[in-house]
Amino acid sequence: MQGWPLSAAEPRALPPGKILPQYLKDLGYTTRIVGKWHLGYYKKELTPTYRGFDSHLGYFNGFTSYYDHITQESASGILMEGLDFRRDLSAAWDLSGRYATDIFTGEAERIIQEHNSSNPLFLYLSHLASHAGNAGKLVEAPQHTINMFHHITEPNRKTYAAMMWKLDESVGRVVRALEAKGMLENSIIVFMSDNGAPSVDVVGYQNWGSNYPLRGLKTTQWEGGVRTPAVIWSPILERRVSSQLIHVTDWLPTLLSAAGGSLQGIVLDGTDQWSALVGKEASPRREALLQYDEVKRTYGLRRDNWKLTNGSNYGGEADGYYGHTGREFSNPPYNVTAVIHSLAGEALASLLSSTTPDEDEILQLRAAATVTCSVKVDAIPCHPVKSSNPCLFDLATDPCETNNLASVYPEVLHEMLDLVSNYEVTLVPQLNKPPDVEGSDPRNFNNTWSPWIVA
């Protein structure tokens, strides 16, 4: 699935193979997906309820609009538009006009409330927030929520803050629902993102988010594009900040291990991180291929603290530093009390009242999780547009990729280049296909985006 993300009219999908919900169903789990799919739907057999999920309320494509749930796409000079909101395979026209984040949160709450808790539950809540929507209304939020952020003067940033507030509220409501159902004490909660923000209008679908202080934007191999914070919570996990390497492919073996499953004899790209998360062992992952785009001739590779990167997207326009610091003078101070008394905070306190963090610990954890960068006076810049030579960074001391050490550590550079060559041998070429404008047009299906090829 590497390369440019699936377009709405593209007859391509996730290849056959067993994925996480199917493994969990083997262990007796009820499996639910709420929100975004974006793994292909040109045949109904490719949609969530055919790939291991018991139900789906959400949308098939990469994004939709927050209120009317219409997805627009231009292909071959033709603008196609239609509803992209489903209950399984049925169009959910009745939900039009309701804010998507609230819909998904309400559905997650309903699933938890109605779940037979004698059986295990896997709930994959894949929010639209804070992805941009259609051109013309890239960011949307309820006006009363936007009005809360009077200290932000830029209108799109104000709306983005409101979108994030609604997402934060969603997390709290879901945690509270788990606590009320008596399921929280036996739950594992993973909160994560798939990529950095498109802070400025370079890569398309700008959302005014910020990757500060990291370099680069969404779709690039810079840390601002590929490195995102994540939180994993369970009552059996110790509170700490970890900077060890974990890759998105690790979640399948990690969560399956936590659920008591086994992958013995099955070869995967992911590594089981559960023991490292529960205990204080080192992460079993030492390296990760971040990107290898044989079309654009760009790649990024991590090994321990070293990172090798080569090439540039968009003529170098996405290679810089973008977005707000979040520390502008006009911003209100960080409110620890509000965190403690948030919906999630109070739900966790009711479960573990004697072990919830106090204000000092919260501030310590926040400081430990904050990425800070200092620029050396004699730093060697990396300008991939000006040079075809790869760049090498030590992310332990330079997470913002300001000092190119390729000439300083030639032996490390060559080792990393050898690793890239090893990965290149296993490359599956990009499989993007031209859009099927005639077949996929929503006008063929009562103005809805729908599977259009019969298996």
Image: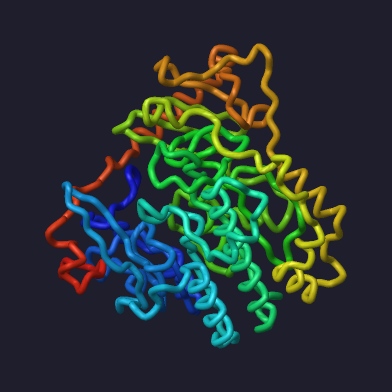
Q: Determine if residue 299 is in view.
A: yes
Q: How is the image coloured?
A: rainbow
Considering only vertical position in the picture, is 431 above or below 44? above
In the foreground, 304 or 219: 219
Residue that appears at 30% across and 42% down: 428
Image location of residue 339, percent across then percent down: 76, 61
Looking at the rendered image, the quarter that the C terminus falls into is bottom left
Who's the residue at 45% across and 71% down the image? Answer: 33
Q: Is residue 29 above or below residue 262?
A: below
Question: Is 79 in front, or is 273?
Answer: 79
Quadrant in the rendering for residue 232 = bottom right
Image position of 49 with respect to 312: above or below? below
In the image, residue 212 lies at what x, y percent?
Answer: 61, 38
Residue 191 visible in image: no
Q: Is residue 332 left or right of residue 423?
A: right
Q: Is 371 placed left or right of 44 in the picture?
A: right
Answer with the quarter of the image where residue 50 lies: bottom left
Provide residue 133's location: percent of width, then percent of height. Answer: 40, 56
Residue at the spot 48% in from the left edge and 48% down from the top edge: 207
Residue furthest to the left: 438
Residue 191 sits in quarter: bottom right
